[in-house]
Image (cartoon, rainbow, N blue to C red):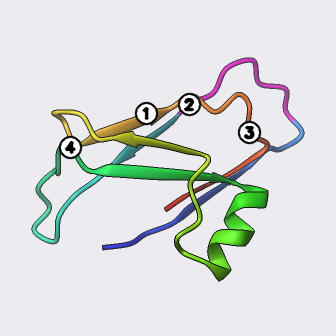
Amino acid sequence: MLFMVACEKGNEEVKEAKVVVSVYDENGKMITGVPVKMYNEKDYKIFEKDNLTLPTAIIQTNESGMATFVPQLFRQIRVA
């Protein structure tokens, strides 16, 4: 299963942001303990050519099937 979401910074000034990802199986059941990878813009361009590229950040889903990233350091984020 693979899905991608892209976020881009607009003209608004935001002091705090977070990305919350929920992971479901094909039956709609939340999946726990699976890795969710996040790439910054530069690393994602490399990932598009080489899917073994290390992610900018990686986090596992919690007991609710959710992964939360706090990406203040990233200008553009891609979740894979």
At 71% across and 59% down in the image, what residue appears? 43
At 11% across and 56% down in the image, what residue appears? 29
State the SS at label 3.
loop
Residue stretch in magenta: 12-18
Provide the major secondary structure of the magenta segment.
loop
- In front: label 3 or label 2: 3
Residue behind mark 3: 74
Q: Amino acid at mark 4?
A: Gly
Residue behind mark 4: 33
**Residues under labels 1 and 4: Cα distance?**
13 Å
Of all residues, the one furthest to the top in this rendering is 15
At 40% across and 51% down in the image, what residue appears? 36
Relative to 20, is 34 above or below? below
Relative to 49, is 28 above or below? above
Q: Residues within 10 Å of mark 3 (few under 14, many from 20)?
A: some
Q: Position of residue 50 (x, y in %)?
A: 61, 78
Q: Amino acid at mark 2?
A: Lys
Tell whether position 49 is magenta.
Answer: no
